[in-house]
Image: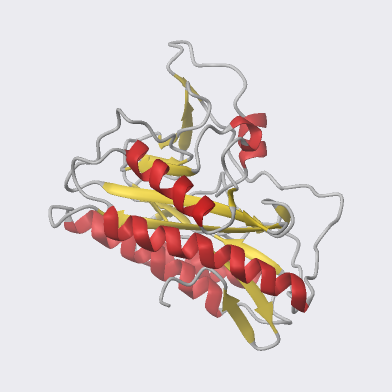
C-alpha cells in the first residue's frame, strides 16, 4: 500500500473535462514525528504475526480469484478472514478509504476501490494490496495475479519482472547497506527489461503506523537520504512498474490511479525486517 495521505494531498482539483485528477510528478516523502523506529524483539514478533495474517489472506485470494468474480467478492473475503484471524483491516477507513483491499486491474496502478459491479475477466492483470493490524502493529503486502491462462505474455512478463525487481531490492537489504542500494537494484532490473518505474509512489516504513519513515524509493534520486539500514528497521518495499510511460493520473473517485497512456501496471510488496546479514520477509507466503 502506498502513501494514502500523500495521495490525498496531491489530488486537489479536476481536469477541464472533470474526468480525472492529475497527480503531481515526483516523490512525496512520508513525514513522521517519531522518525525511523527500531523495533524490539517483542515488536518484531508481533509484526510477524500481523504479517502472517496478511500473507495468509493474499494466498487465499490468489487461489480463490476466478473470472466472473467481482473485486467486491475479494474484499468481503479479505475482511472476513482478517477479522477471523484476530486482526483488523489496516486499510478500511484509513483516510476514508472504503475497503479492506485495494484491487487494481490492468492499467489501474494503485488504490483501486473494490466493487460488486467490477467483474474480473479472464486475462486481467489484477493487483491486490492489503494490510492487517494486530496487537498494535501492521503488516502490508501486495501481489499481482494473472487471471486465467488467457493473460497475454507481455502482461505475464510485466508481472514477473515486477516480482523479480522486488526480490532484487530485498537482496540488497542488510545492516550497513543503504536505501539507495535498494532503489538502484530495483531500477536497474526494471529498466533492463524495458519497463518504467512509477516514481509518484514509494515504499515506506511500517510498524505501529501503517506508514512510517523512511520512504523507500524504487529509483535513484537526490531526494532520498542515503540512510544506512540498521537491524530492527521494518520496511514495506513495493516496486510499481508500468509497461509504457511512468506517468499516472487519479480518477474522480480520488483514489484509483491509472496510467496516463493506458498501459498495464504491476506491483509486488513485502513487509520485511532488517537483520545484520540480510532481511526477514515477514509477509512471505510460502509457509
Q: Nearer the viewer, residue 158 or 111?
A: 111
Identify the residue at horizontal 72%, vertical 82% (top origin): 175
Q: Position of residue 183 (x, y in %)?
A: 58, 65
Q: Position of residue 51 (x, y in %)?
A: 57, 65
Residue found farthest to the right: 33
Asked whether residue 228 appears in the rendered view, the answer is no
Q: What is the quadrant of the C terminus in the image?
A: bottom left
Q: Position of residue 254 (x, y in %)?
A: 53, 26
Residue found farthest to the left: 150
Residue 143 occupies quadrant:
bottom left
Left of 170 or right of it: where is 196?
left
Q: Nearer the viewer, residue 248 or 279?
A: 279
The colour style of the image is: secondary structure
Q: Position of residue 157 (x, y in %)?
A: 27, 62
Left of 101 or right of it: where is 120?
left
Asked whether residue 111 appears in the rendered view, the answer is yes
Residue found farthest to the bottom: 277
Q: How many marks?
A: 0
Identify the residue at horizontal 40%, vertical 34% (top origin): 260
Identify the residue at horizontal 13%, vertical 57% (top origin): 149
Identify the residue at horizontal 67%, vertical 43% (top origin): 28
Q: In the rendered view, tell whether residue 126 sits above or below residue 237.
A: above
Amino acid at each position: 500500500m502506498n502513501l494514502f495521505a500523500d495521495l490525498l494531498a496531491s489530488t486537489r482539483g479536476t481536469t477541464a473535462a472533470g474526468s480525472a485528477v492529475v497527480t503531481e510528478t515526483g516523490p512525496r516523502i512520508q513525514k513522521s514525528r517519531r522518525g525511523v523506529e527500531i523495533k524490539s524483539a517483542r515488536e518484531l514478533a508481533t509484526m510477524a504475526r500481523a504479517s502472517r495474517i496478511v500473507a495468509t489472506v493474499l494466498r487465499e485470494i490468489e487461489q480463490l480469484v476466478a473470472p466472473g468474480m467481482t473485486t467486491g467478492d475479494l474484499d468481503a473475503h479479505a475482511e472476513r478472514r482478517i477479522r477471523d484471524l484476530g486482526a483488523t483491516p489496516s486499510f478500511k477507513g484509513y483516510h476514508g478509504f472504503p475497503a479492506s483491499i485495494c484491487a487494481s486491474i490492468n492499467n489501474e496502478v494503485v488504490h483501486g476501490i473494490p466493487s460488486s459491479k467490477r467483474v474480473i475477466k479472464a486475462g486481467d492483470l489484477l493487483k491486490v494490496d492489503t494490510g492487517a493490524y494486530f496487537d498494535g502493529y501492521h503488516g502490508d503486502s501486495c501481489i499481482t495475479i494473472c487471471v486465467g491462462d488467457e493473460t497475454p505474455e507481455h502482461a505475464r512478463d510485466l508481472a514477473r519482472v515486477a516480482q523479480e525487481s522486488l526480490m532484487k531490492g530485498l537482496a540488497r537489504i542488510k545492516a550497513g547497506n543503504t536505501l539507495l542500494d535498494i532503489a538502484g537494484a530495483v531500477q536497474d532490473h526494471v529498466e533492463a527489461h524495458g519497463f518504467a518505474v512509477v516514481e509518484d509512489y514509494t515504499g515506506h516504513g511500517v510498524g505501529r503506523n501503517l506508514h512510517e519513515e523512511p520512504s523507500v524509493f524504487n529509483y535513484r534520486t537526490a531526494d532520498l537520504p542515503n540512510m544506512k539500514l540498521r537491524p530492527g528497521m521494518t520496511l514495506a518495499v513495493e516496486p510499481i512498474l508500468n509497461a509504457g510511460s511512468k506517468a499516472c493520473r487519479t480518477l474522480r473517485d480520488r483514489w484509483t490511479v491509472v496510467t496516463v497512456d493506458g498501459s498495464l501496471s504491476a506491483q509486488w510488496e513485502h513487509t520485511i525486517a532488517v537483520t545484520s546479514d540480510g532481511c526477514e520477509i515477514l509477509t512471505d507466503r510460502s509457509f
